Amino acid sequence: MKLPIYLDNNSTTQVDPRVLEAMMPFLTEKFGNAASRSHAFGWETEEAVEKSRVSIAKLIGANPKEIVFTSGATESINIALKGAAEMYVEKGNHIITAETEHKATLDSAKYLEKHGCTVTYLPVDKNGAVTAEQVKAALTDKTILISLMHANNEVGTVHPIEAIGKIAKEAGVLFHVDAAQTTGKIPINVETMGIDILSISAHKMYGPKGVGGLYVRRSNPRVRLSPVVHGGGHERGFRSGTLNVPGIVGFGTAAEICLNEMAADAVRLTSLRDRLHKGLCAQLDEIFLNGDPIQRLPNNLNISFAFVEGEAMMMGLQEVAVSSGSACTSASLEPSYVLKAMGIGEELAHTSIRFGLGRFTTEEEIDFVIQKVVAVVLKLRDMSPLYEMAKEGIDLKSVQWTAH
Ligand SMILES: *Cc1c(COP(=O)(O)O)cnc(C)c1O
């Protein structure tokens, strides 16, 4: 077993060796511009790009013609929100999203607010979920777009996409889904789920960084989006720029592997995730699951450990690559806005850890992580007067702390 152990697969994933192998020729001898129509160098790369388009479309139940290649989910999300806002300005200017979305969505929404749009940020429940009823209640006759993530990247909560898609259809409002965390991990079908626009990232599904996709529905309804990047009219005008052929080949290969292995991977990861959770619960009290206990990703476990100091815990866990519920801003340690939106107090937000499992995570690694985390938490609690008081049955809320 190699240290440190990588358990941050919700941030990025390792490129699958089979993906790298497929990419290599396109980084060496097959270097043609996929837009070059006049010679064999261009034809062979164009063919490879179209093959990837087919694999990616298949993974989400789409037609290959509906896939646009981008530089990643951040760009796809920008095109979805800004492109729809500009294209449908005569229909309306209202967008519905949620407080726990990725920054790519929130920052695009904030930008659009400065340019004449009105945005509703739906609050989430304690598990991090929004309901279809909430979405329905937020609709106005000016609503042009609903933009929600399929699953949350911090806590893994999966939104009821199919039910929301149905409401969007009934209202005649476009539905964009940020599926960066779910494509290739859990089933997606843009038809049955009523999705009109979908954002994908290759590096979250064992493909390379810097490449992604945007699904844009071509019929019932035919979605139009104003371009964000202008240029040679590549990708049917949705996204100009010479295609990243090696990246796209890697993305397509990653999609093919997911098509074949997704179901088995999900079963294996769910079992490892539950082994980790049970292992921690068996040896530690006062630990709390963040996120939905049922509607969640197979590969994510977000836990808060009461009565420990967040930074000290991260220091003690240097052999395990995880992410914490605090974000370092220049001056202070800010608790995650996702946990905050779920109503989780600052103390517990600061001591939360996101364990992101992946295709290459082993049982041996999980057992090592359990033992390591338990040891660190027990050690820190040993030094915590608060933990001692709580164990003695003192209600900490009733204690009158002296000011100093
Ligand atoms: C990673 C991620 C993104 C951004 O994707 P990039 O390809 O890195 O730009 C957007 N949304 C979610 C939910 C993500 O997890």
Image: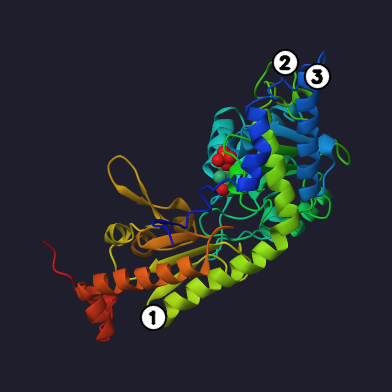
Q: Is residue 85 above or below residue 153?
A: above
Q: What residue did someone put label 2 on?
A: 232
Q: Residue furthest front?
A: 29
Residue shown at 29%/67% (left/top)? 308
Q: Mark 1 is on which residue type?
A: Gln
Q: Mark 3 is on which residue type?
A: Ala
**Quadrant location of residue 92?**
top right
First in sequence: mark 3 vs mark 2:
3
Q: What residue did someone put label 3 on?
A: 40
User: Mark 2 and mark 3 in contact (Cβ < 8 Å)?
Assistant: no
> Is disc 2 placed on a helix, strand or loop?
loop
Q: Residue furthest right?
A: 220
First in sequence: mark 1 vs mark 3:
3
Q: Mark 2 is on which residue type?
A: Gly
> Is disc 1 placed on a helix, strand or loop?
helix
> Is disc 3 placed on a helix, strand or loop?
helix
**Quadrant location of residue 110?**
top right
Alpha carbon distance from label 3 to label 2: 21 Å
In the rendered structure, the answer to whether residue 109 lies left or right of residue 234 reads: left
In x, y percent, where is residue 295? Answer: 63, 66
